[in-house]
Every structure is written in structure tokens, then in C-alpha cells.
Image (cartoon, helix red, strand yellow):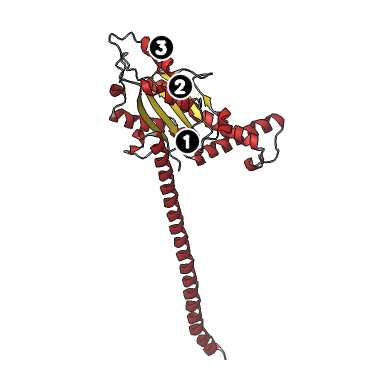
Amino acid sequence: MSKCAVHMMKMKSSAMGGIQSHNQREHESTKNKDIDYEKSDRNFDLVNDEPINYQRAIKERIAELNLKKAVRKDAVTYCSFIVSSDRGFFEQLAWQEHIKRETNSRESVAIGVNEPVPFEYMPKSYQEDCFTEGSRNFFQSATDFFRERYGVDNVINATVHMDEATPHMHLGIVPVTKDGRLSAKSIFTKVELQALQTAFAEQVGAKYGLERGTEGSEATHLSEERFKLKMAQDKAEEAKREAEKAKQERYAEEVKKEQAVLDAQNARKTLLEVQGDINPLKAKKKP
């Protein structure tokens, strides 16, 4: 079963140029080979209609706090979350979007028509639209979760990348406490990060059939590159476990078959023995 993947990194203002460029695809990356720039037009932001200046957006939010002291240069001003799951999960969302469209279309035309057209037979452009729309619904639910938990005004971007191997969202939060302070340390404690993982799984993941990520996993604090590697490793381990489970099930099935053959042979042997006892008795009864 697919799992929720929620990862957070604390960032200082000096890192905003890089994260802005990456999220909004302002320049082609020479390091990230996963990006297919021909698909970048399918990326979208669930908070902003147009690209934004991260530094400006953060400064404007902090200015609204009317802080008594100036913000230190080394202060954490942006907390970057990556939200995702595995590729198979998003393919399932695409299929569900297809079924929804087919159902709505058929209900508006007639009753008693044939079954929906298999998804794989639909045009490539249609499949991509379903893939994007299915993903959008999930990420919108995730964005709503973060905005409710940490404040609508504090979420400055929710950028979804559809141009890499697996869809994922980069969501940025200015760490403002409920009493109006700028303090990532006060908000994102170890306890809160664990509670966040559980709450996200219950309020968002469960709605889409996702399980909570492994409790106590270090994935919450990894760099983006190591996070992607960890996800790939976890997926490989999951596949390995599933393969071993299937192997054991096949073995158990073979054992059942062999036992069934033995039982049949024993039953036949018993039948022959009984017939051997009955036949002489029948012979004696004859006049």
C-alpha cells in the first residue's frame, strides 16, 4: 500500500534565490536529470496564479508582524515541505479521474450504456490530463491541510512539479507562531513534526487510501536529493517484501496442492482396502 511522504527543510533568506529558481523553473538544472522540461508547462501553483519573488513575499509577511526587533540574518524565514507518494499512487488517481469523467459523461447521455473505455485505450493527451487533474485534487487537499494548520497567510507557495518521475509539491511556509513571532524552532519541534505526520495521514492520506509514513523515519529531515533516494530505497524494499510475500503464498499454494494429491491418493487407497473387505463378504452371500 502506498504511503504518505512529507519532508521538511528549514531555510534562511540567503537560500531563497535557489529554491525560487528550482520551484518556478527559472533556469534549467544541470544537476537534476529527472526534470523533463517539455512537461514543465504542466506544473502549477495552488497559492499563486503567477510566479512570485520569494524574498519579497517573505519580507512582506514578516513586515505584517510588526516585530519589535529586526530579524537576524541567520534566522529561519522559510520552511520548505515536500509532499508526495510513489508513482503508482498517482497513476491510480489518474485512473479514478478517468472513471469519474466517464461516469459523468455517460450519465448525461444515456442509461444502460457499455462499461467505461479502458484508460489505456484513451489518447495520450487525455491520460496526461487525468494524471494532472487527479494529482491536483490530492495536492489541493494537502495545501488546505497546511493552510489550516499553520495559517493561510503563512503559506506563500504550493508549487506542484509534474515534470519529474513522480509528482510532488514544494510548499513554503513562513514560520509565524500563533502569538505573532517568527520562530521555526518554536513551531516545528520534534513532537510537532511527528504529530504533523500522523495528522496528515489521518486527514489527507486516508481520504486517498494512503498509509502513514514509517514512524520515526529520518525522511522528515533529509535534503531533497537524499529524500528522493530514501523514497526510492523504501519503494525497492516494499517491492522486495511484496515479492517475498508472493513467493511464500505460491509456496503455500503448492504445498496445498501436494497435500490434496496425497489426500486423494490416501482416499483411493482406503477405498480399495474397503472394497477388498467388502468383495469377499459379497461372495459369501451368493447361493
Count of labels in the image: 3
Q: Which residue is pictured at 40% across the width and 12% down the height? A: 60
CA gap, disc 1 and disc 3:
31 Å
Element under disc 3: helix
If the image is split into quadrants, where does the C terminus sit? bottom right
Q: Could you say where residue 40 lies in the image, as x and y percent from the top left?
A: 55, 30
Q: Is residue 96 left or right of residue 250?
A: right
Q: Which residue is pictured at 28% across the width and 10% down the height? A: 69
- Give the residue number, with chain letter if any, for mark 2: 157
Mark 1 nearby-residue class (10 Å; few <14, some 14–19, many ≥20)? few
* Residue 60 disc label: 3
- Give the residue number, with chain letter if any, for mark 1: 32
If the image is split into quadrants, where does the N terminus sit? top left
Label whose residue precedes the other's in the sequence (3 or 2): 3
Residue 81: name its quadrant: top left
Residue 39 versus residue 54 in the image, above or below: below
Element under disc 2: strand
Label whose residue precedes the other's in the sequence (2 or 1): 1
Mark 2 nearby-residue class (10 Å; few <14, some 14–19, many ≥20)? many
Q: Which residue is pictured at 64% across the width and 31% down the height? A: 104
Confirm whether residue 145 shows in the render: no
CA gap, disc 2 and disc 1:
21 Å
Q: Could you say where residue 105 lies in the image, as x and y percent from the top left?
A: 67, 31
CA gap, disc 3 and disc 2:
14 Å
Q: Nearer the viewer, residue 46 or 178?
A: 46
Pair 2/1: label in front: 1
Q: Which residue is pictured at 58% across the width and 38% down the height? A: 95
Label whose residue precedes the other's in the sequence (1 or 3): 1
Dot 1 amino acid type = Asn
